[in-house]
Image: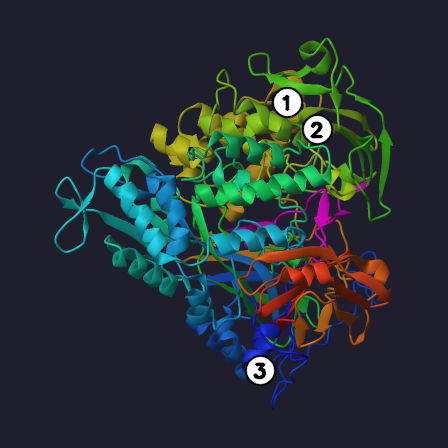
């Protein structure tokens, strides 16, 4: 992670910047939208201006609405040819991005790029106990999974595969995000404990294998019941090209301790059906070269344990949905995700405890926090998210454009397409699929690409009331934050669902003794919301669309429902531990109250915008895209009839088609039930939605949808700036077209500034005498001027002795604007030992969610 330098020869590991690579290559420019010089690139750490307090209007007004392009074409491009294809004009941008090792190629080609963090590489294990009694799965034993942390040399992987430019990773929390800086002392301790130690790994694994009934043969290979223990290893051969050498290295390490490894090199779409939809206990596979990409800057990262280790995950894929972690880990994961804590200190301690529990469980063994470089042609203007880059950013379809030009065609290259079916309930979660899907979405709020906070999108304002004593703060003026001793949930708020009567159950009915909550969010939508926001098939959005999303949250988990799906139950049960009710108090303007015990530290992230699509909060009935009530009604009819299923597990169990809105056999089935809905003048959940939908309105909606399907051969509609015009699943191409009826001006989100990431320099004595005080200076700048103190949340220092043990963790002292000092007291230096020690400083700004670390080595001498 750090490169050791002596006095005044500093290396700043600026998370979110590529300073390490600058030093390695002696050639670097800075994001965002960096264009290398035609001759040679300067070695510079210059940053652009900080973002304004809110997105501002661009200088030149436009009359255009929706996206800036007329058309966006997606196609599959191998990462090895991405640069060549951009130069040839075959594509305009390679959205998946390239690894750090490919950075010189981008520079040599003279292409601009943006760089983001948030791509995480790991080994994902199959935890299943084999149903075939003649086989064993070593990774069904958590002790063996844990031991592989000692078997894999993360630094070797970083040096050999990524030219030493990425960051080593042991935990699900992201090394570039604030929580890691906050818990840097905990991380350092655990990283030391779980440092590379193959002898220890082999000893533990051998003991566990023998206990499972295996033994080594004369050749030193593990056998079980007379057969070699063969590990089926799914190694991705596509992506950015780095998972193949990682897979080979991991295979070599496993083979070195007696395992036989069947290396299966596969692309995303070849491997996906095996590990994502297969039954773990069939033992068709044992480990997979996994990678995860962030879609937002996660300011707290408190949901990660639930998402990566427990059945309550919203991921909807194996082997996570069938995972059985230790009960204390499962409880902690869900309590964290649901905000079951009283103070930030308690939250931090829970996350710290979870770091160790995650290592003990090791369903996933984390290896590398990656940096991704996204190249594009010079004529393109690209906005990006510090964590999600371009592909995973909510903001991308609203801001990408040709410089000083409206319209045109954008050609996007990606590593793959159509990894899984498209449906908003249980469809594809592949990053390459979700990029196109995001262009079809809008949302109640917009994620800030630099801070991770929310801005109002289809909502206008919100008032967040929090129970006194719970630590919540706000940054933006669009949200009002207040506190009260108690929040009583109104009796007429909806808190549950009766699948038989198809009506909501009120708080008064379910909890006659009354109910309280920790948070109340009162959100007001734009006054013309239902008049201006349209679905792509021409139908206006309605209150029924919003209510349908809550009905789907409940109806699918009720055994009495015709669309019951057991896969949805664990996540819903976790949701219900904190959900306390909601109600619509007005339809003009639309006003929604939400009551919950789930608390975020930021008021902006406690705003619950009822929305028929992905949201920034825990309410996620449609996690994979937007869903109009009339489209979902057709799919519900097909599922109730036993012909389709939204999720992979249900489709496998019932041996029916996995619902796909854009292609395959699903379309013919959906067509049949669309005709049925029209003939029956069908109003779904009529006992509830009948007050918002008449039979005539329902038929009008269905007919508009039928006309849309006839033209586009797709049931995928959203409210976003682009719509899916054509999807060719065999050829793996997809075309988006500009949605002319989109309500917002094209330049609405064009005013984001650039990330205000700090540059940190650390100076001090090269030698320190044990037992004597020493002082170091910390300089924090932006564009070579002092970083505003008002924009700095914390400056913390850590002292490591020659054995890499933490000796001290303390806040640095403010001297003046942009200047801090670190004082190592005589008591601190007395605890050191002679040799080379390290001082690390972590700077956490408030205006950008990327901390900066700087390290300096010094030698301690005996008095």
Q: Give residue 332's position: percent from left, percent from top.
A: 57, 34
Q: Which of the marked residues, 2 or 1, is nearer the chain's N terminus?
A: 2
Q: How far apart are marks 3 and 2 (CA)?
A: 52 Å
Q: Say if the magenta span includes residue 131.
A: no
Q: Which of 700 and 513 is in front in this view?
A: 513
Query: Badge 2: how crowded within 10 Å, few (<14), some, or many (20+)?
Result: many
Which image quarter holds the C terminus?
Answer: bottom right
Location of mark 2 (residue): 597
Which mark is in front, 1 or 3? Answer: 3
Q: Is residue 821 left or right of residue 223?
A: right
Q: Residue 110 carries which label?
A: 3
- State which quadrant residue 808 falls in: bottom right
Q: Which residue is at 81% across, 65% downward? A: 58
Q: Which residue is at 61% across, 63% downward? A: 832
Query: Mark 1 and mark 2 in contact (Cβ < 8 Å)?
Result: no
Q: Residue 695 carries which label?
A: 1
Q: Is mark 1 on a helix, strand or loop?
A: helix
Magenta stretch in the rendered image: 433-460
């Amino acid at each position: 992670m750090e490169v050791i330098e002596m006095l005044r020869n500093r290396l700043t590991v600026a998370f979110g910047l590529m300073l390490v690579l600058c030093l390695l290559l002696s050639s670097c420019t800075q994001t965002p939208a960096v264009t290398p010089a035609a001759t040679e690139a300067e070695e510079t750490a210059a940053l652009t201006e900080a973002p304004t307090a809110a997105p501002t209007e661009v200088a030149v007004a436009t009359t255009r609405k929706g996206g800036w392009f007329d058309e966006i074409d997606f196609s599959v491009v191998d990462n090895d040819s991405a640069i060549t294809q951009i130069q040839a004009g075959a594509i305009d941008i390679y959205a998946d991005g390239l690894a750090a090792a490919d950075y010189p190629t981008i520079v040599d080609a003279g292409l601009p790029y943006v760089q983001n963090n948030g791509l995480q590489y790991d080994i994902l294990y199959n935890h299943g106990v084999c149903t075939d009694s003649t086989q064993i799965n070593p990774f069904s034993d958590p002790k063996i999974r844990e031991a592989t942390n000692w078997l894999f040399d993360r630094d070797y992987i970083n040096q050999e595969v990524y030219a030493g430019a990425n960051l080593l990773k042991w935990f699900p929390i992201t090394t570039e995000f604030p929580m890691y800086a906050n818990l840097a002392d905990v991380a350092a301790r655990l990283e030391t404990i779980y440092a590379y130690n193959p002898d220890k790994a082999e000893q533990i694994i051998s003991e566990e294998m023998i206990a499972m009934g295996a033994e080594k043969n004369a050749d030193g290979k593990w056998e079980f019941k007379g057969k070699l223990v063969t590990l089926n290893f799914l190694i991705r051969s596509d992506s950015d090209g780095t998972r193949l050498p990682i897979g080979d290295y991991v295979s070599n390490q496993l083979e070195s301790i007696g395992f036989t490894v069947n290396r299966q090199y596969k692309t995303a779409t070849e491997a996906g059906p095996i590990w994502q939809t297969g039954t773990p206990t069939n033992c068709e596979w044992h480990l997979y070269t996994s990678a995860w990409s962030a879609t937002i800057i996660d300011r707290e990262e408190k949901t990660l344990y639930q998402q990566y280790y427990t059945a309550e995950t919203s991921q909807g894929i194996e082997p996570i949905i069938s995972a059985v972690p230790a009960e204390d880990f499962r409880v902690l994961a869900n309590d964290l995700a649901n905000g079951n804590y009283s103070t930030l200190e308690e939250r931090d301690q829970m996350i710290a405890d979870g770091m160790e529990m995650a290592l003990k469980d090791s369903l996933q063994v984390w290896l590398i926090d990656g940096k991704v470089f996204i190249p594009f042609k010079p004529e393109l203007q690209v906005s990006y998210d510090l964590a999600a880059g371009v592909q995973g950013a909510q903001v991308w379809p609203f801001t990408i454009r040709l410089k000083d030009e409206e319209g045109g065609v954008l050609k996007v290259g990606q590593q793959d397409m159509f990894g899984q079916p498209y449906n908003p309930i249980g469809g594809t979660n592949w990053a390459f699929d979700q990029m196109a899907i995001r262009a079809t979405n809008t949302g109640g709020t917009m994620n800030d690409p630099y801070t991770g906070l929310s801005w109002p999108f289809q909502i206008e304002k919100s008032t967040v009331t929090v129970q006194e004593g719970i630590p919540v703060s706000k940054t933006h003026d669009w949200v009002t934050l207040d506190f009260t001793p108690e929040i009583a949930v109104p009796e007429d708020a909806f808190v549950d669902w009766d699948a038989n009567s198809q009506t909501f159950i009120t708080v008064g009915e379910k909890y006659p003794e009354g109910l309280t909550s920790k948070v109340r969010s009162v959100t007001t939508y734009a006054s013309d919301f239902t008049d201006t926001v349209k679905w792509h098939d021409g139908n206006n959005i309605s209150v029924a669309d919003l209510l349908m999303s809550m009905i789907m949250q409940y109806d699918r988990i009720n055994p009495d429902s015709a669309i019951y799906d057991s896969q949805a139950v664990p996540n819903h049960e976790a949701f219900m531990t904190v959900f306390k009710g909601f109600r619509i108090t007005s339809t003009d303007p639309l006003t929604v109250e939400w009551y919950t015990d789930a608390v975020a530290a930021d008021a902006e992230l406690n705003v619950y915008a009822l929305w028929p699509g992905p949201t920034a909060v825990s309410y996620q009935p449609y996690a994979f895209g937007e869903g109009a009530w009339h489209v979902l009604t057709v799919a519900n009819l097909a599922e109730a009839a036993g012909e389709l299923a939204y999720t992979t597990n249900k489709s496998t169990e019932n041996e029916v088609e996995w619902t796909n809105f854009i292609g395959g056999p699903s379309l013919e089935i959906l067509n049949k039930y669309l005709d049925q809905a029209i003939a029956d003048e069908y109003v779904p959940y009529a006992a509830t939605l009948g007050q918002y939908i008449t039979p005539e309105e329902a038929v009008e909606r269905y007919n508009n949808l039928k006309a849309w399907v006839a033209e586009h051969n797709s049931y995928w509609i959203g409210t976003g700036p682009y719509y899916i015009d054509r999807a060719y699943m065999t050829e793996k191409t997809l075309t988006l077209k500009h949605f002319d009826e989109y309500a917002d001006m094209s330049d609405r989100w064009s005013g984001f500034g650039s990330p205000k990431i700090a540059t940190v320099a650390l100076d001090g004595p090269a030698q320190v005498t044990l037992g004597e005080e020493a002082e170091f200076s910390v300089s924090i700048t932006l564009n070579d001027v002092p970083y505003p103190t008002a924009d700095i949340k914390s400056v913390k220092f850590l002292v490591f002795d020659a054995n890499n043990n933490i000796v001290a963790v303390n806040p640095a002292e403010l001297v003046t604007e942009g200047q801090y000092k670190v004082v190592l007291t005589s008591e601190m230096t007395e605890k050191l030992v002679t040799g080379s020690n390290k001082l690390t400083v972590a700077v956490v700004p408030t205006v950008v969610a990327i901390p900066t670390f700087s390290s300096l080595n010094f030698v301690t001498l005996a008095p």
